[in-house]
Image: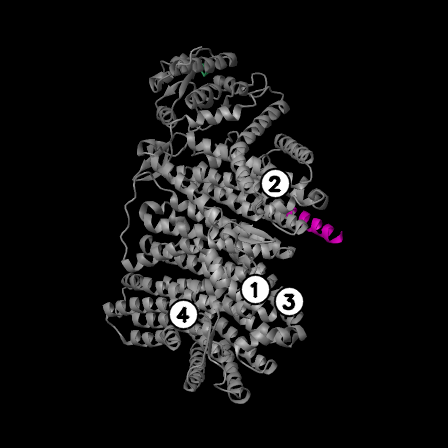
Amino acid sequence: MLDTLVFVTVLLPFLVAAVLLVLREQNVRKVILVATAGVLALASLAMLRGGAFIMSPAPLYDTLITLGDFVILFVVLFVGIKRKNQIIIWLSVAQIIGLIILDFFMVKEHGNIPAFFADDLSLVMVLIISIVGSLIAVYGIGYMKEHEEHLHLTKSKQPQFFFFIVLFLGAMNGLVLANNLLWMYFFWECTTLCSFMLIGHDDTEIARKNAERALWMNVLGGTAFLFGIILLQKVVGTLSLQEILARGPEFAVAGGAILVPMFLLVFAGMTKAAQAPFQSWLTGAMVAPTPVSALLHSSTMVKAGVYIIVRLAPVYAGTYFSNFVALFGAFVFLATACLAAGQSNGKKILAYSTISNLALIIACAGINTPAAITAAILLILFHAISKALMFLCVGAIEQKIGSRDIEDMRGLFAVMPRTALVAIIGIMTMMLPPFGMLMAKWMAIESAHGQFLLMIMLALGSGVTVLFWCRWAGLMLGTPVAKAKPEAQDITVRAPLYILAGLALVVSFFSPVVYNSLVAPVVKMYYKAAPYALPYGNFDSPVGIFLVYPLFLLLGLGFYFALKQARKVTAAQCSQPYMCGEQQTVDGKPGFLGPLGLHVPVQSGNYYLEQFFGETMLSKWINVIALAVLVIMLFGGAL
Amino acid sequence: MITKIILAILALVAAPLLGALITGVDRRITAWLQSRYGPPILQPIYDVLKLLGKEPMVTNTWQALCAYVYIVGAALSVVLLFTGSDLLLIFFVLTVGAVFLVMGALASPSPYSQIGGQRELLQMLAYEPLLILVFAAIAMVTGSFKVSAVFEQTRPLLYDLPLMYIVLGYALTIKLRKSPFDISASAHAHQELVRGVYTEYSGPFLAMIEIAHWYEVILVLGLCALFWSTSVVGMVVLVAVTYLAEIIVDNVTARLTWRFMLKSAVGMGLVLTLVNMLWLYAQ
Amino acid sequence: MLGNLINQGRIKSPWVVHFDCGSCNGCDIEVLACLTPIYDIERFGILNIGNPKHADVLLVTGTVNHRNKHVLKNIYDQMPGPKAVIAIGACGCSGGVFREAYNVVGGVDKVIPVDVYVPGCPARPEAIIDGVVAALEKVKTLLGMTA
Ligand code: SF4
């Protein structure tokens, strides 16, 4: 049974991907994709029911993985040579050498280490990848059809596209289930390669450039990862994640030796999670078709980065290094929230907000208390759902109105009421109580309790976050009175939107259950303490209390009441906006009656506060500071 | 549990009435400072009664929704405060209302409402971090974010956090949109802004916003009262003095720009917080 | 009961919006004078709210001309009921000295229904306050609240 499940979640995507690559028939592809999505989702749920496990497949696979490693590295090297990118060339050469040393000279007991192991953290990750990721893949069907029509391609590139998308899911599942770090390294490199291919998918000048940047940054991370595990092998003498988790804390307490490999692995996680100063690869990734962005931002890729950081957190708990990780996370959280506030490009806002949220997760990992780790895991979960939803919305909106600028989304409700509503639900679940994201943020802030520098950055950051979400939601509502006609949408686009919106609401509602059954056990396992008691389903600890059900009930009732009041308003009670008595509406466009009876349409724009939040100016400083913190982290914390 | 429910109902019913009276007194004192006679103390209640009786008028139905969610958020946060819940949670619930108020304002194409909404966002940007910092500082002293923990203190928080009280005062001036920070709207009409974020809400919906404002006044004064939690007299005196100071500041200052507000709020907030924290560590 | 309370509120809280419909500014200054400490109309709960959507009473000064009559109408329409209109000054009441001018429509009542006329050139602040009180009396009779 277990074998089958691991097979389905990890290997099946690889096989399906291969089929999709050769398949050119549109309808069959659709069926296969939907079926795979369903199977993956079911398998992940079944796996969750089965609980924690350890598994070692046949030794043959070990050889295959090693082979795969080298194949990927040579592909990367080849890309580097083709693009004449020195960084990629040298980094991949370094990795090849490193891998040879590790594989042939250092690791003696090949095959003795179980390849897979899963605890609740891995299982939650599998759930996110298999459900959210699959939904995005399904959305891709409808999206790519329209995307290619728009581009007027003579030959469809969809086989290649879906090959990498599905491969990505398999690799991610492999990554989070891996116990043998060599296996994890293979999947890690897989995701790097997939993201490179997907970012460059449209093959425009800018896509190629951004894909290349994503590649070198992630290859840098990959190199750090590889050398991290080489050092781990030296220090701990094993590459079994489980054993490292069990024995790591002794080393961390005894001395700094283990902190250098920890630094390298955490650094690798930071590059993958696009933390400053490497944020530019993720913001550049938005040139790719929207399903790719959604996938990179929510359930795959960047989540791999934070996964490794959270996963290893128990090993470096209670060290100076951990404090620096927290500081770094909090700083990037604030800095990228500011960057998001200065943007009007919807996808860029989402990108910076992703980086900001990931940074918060990293900060939680650095704070490294049971409560903080709980916050981190819940953030990973809720962020995946809401962020995937937001990206899919922006994708659908962009295909309809031809722009991803939030200024162009003014009054979107009149054009596409359903998508606008779903997007607003997405935004609400991102920023307001009683939803999961906010609850996790509450945990994060309260667990930073006592560390004032962290607290200041978190406080400022969450203020800025409200700013950019709120105005986006508000301006989509701006509509004239007339009833909006629901927009037509492909079912493969609409269904994922609705399912994700439903998930965002429902999973938030059941957050006490999620905490109790998925998060608390794993936190207890590594930290020997559960951070929250759940009287009446409320998160209670000596530090604070979060009322889940009362808030849901009262806010829900209040909202229902408000909705009923709003429904009572009749068309006759609607009036023109106040414009000094000179208002005039022409073709549904509000405006002023100007001189000579001319119509002057109303124009408005958000404050983007360029003088504070301007991207070019701010990015420079952010990169310098982030780099400095990283250097200090290495020398002050790890050495 | 029963006491909590009673407290919650008390908060729900008594808070707006008290808030209305305080607003009435505020208007009276303001008039007095301007050597006017001023309206009756119950004037805010008359105003709201009248607004409730007006014909509903909106530019789109979202505004009705937003006005009601605003009052729900404000009322709920007061209930949470009275039942001794979590300070951060109270703050987040308050944000729900504030966010919807702005969304309703942005839903109308009227330039006044748009500018008001944007400016209200800036006001939120200025006061939110300050409030979180104040709560964090309170938690530093009491060891918990729970309101109930404040009441277990043996000596007033003001002794430990004198500077944080100033930060709180600053945040509250911004939150209540009192001069010099009546940037997004104010009780009176502004020439260039009309009524800012309130412009497009009218009749019963404006009444909801006014009542929500009463709740907010109580919430804000309740937060101030936490700084002298050891005696009721102390609380009343502290709140009265603070509110009087607030009214005087409101009357003697002119409106500032949002740039000044942001810079000063963040700058001053951080400096005072750091100094106060050092003082706390030094103790 | 609630209806009674609301009627009480209506009488005690008339918020005004002042629209200058082409006045010579004489009447405008007198309207503003009502707000000053000497006359202090806030005593009666009167606020100059500056927004038709919030106002109960529309104070119009000056003559109506062809260029601005639609503005007057728009502002009147944007006031949610119940509402009252007070025409102030000779100009507002009838067009005053300008009534024969080619560009002038006439008094305010040519465009919107007027409840109270406050004559004078300019109307004195006392007269304006009197006008508002007269309007309230009228509202009282309409609401059946005559004492
Ligand atoms: S009535 Fe007299 S003072 Fe008033 S606007 Fe007309 S001319 Fe001017």
Q: Whereabouts is ligand 1, in terms of quadrant? A: top left
Report how far apart the C-alphas of labels 1 and 4 lie in the structure.
Answer: 26 Å
Q: Chain of mark 1?
A: A
Mark 4 residue CB less than 8 A from any atom of ligand 1: no
Q: Dot 3: few (<14), some (14–19), or many (≥20) neighbours within 10 Å? A: some
Tell me the quarter of the image containing the C terminus of chain A.
bottom right
Q: Dot 1: few (<14), some (14–19), or many (≥20) neighbours within 10 Å? A: many
- Is disc 3 placed on a helix, strand or loop? loop
Report how far apart the C-alphas of labels 4 and 2 lie in the structure.
Answer: 48 Å
Q: Which label belongs to residue B223?
A: 2
Relative image position of residue B197 (x, y in whole percent) = 47, 37
Q: Which label belongs to residue A365?
A: 1
Query: Farthest residue toward the right?
Result: B283
Query: The residue under label 2 is which amino acid type?
Result: Leu
Q: Chain of mark 4?
A: A
Which residue corresponds to the image point at 51% horizontal and 84% vertical from the top-left? Answer: A99
- Is disc 1 placed on a helix, strand or loop? helix
Q: Earlier in the sequence, mark 1 or mark 4?
A: 4
Tell me the quarter of the image containing the N terminus of chain A.
bottom left
| Most common secondary structure along the magenta stretch | helix
Q: Are marks 4 and 2 in contact (CB under 8 Å)?
A: no
Query: The residue under label 3 is which amino acid type?
Result: Gly
* Segment colored magenta: B268-283
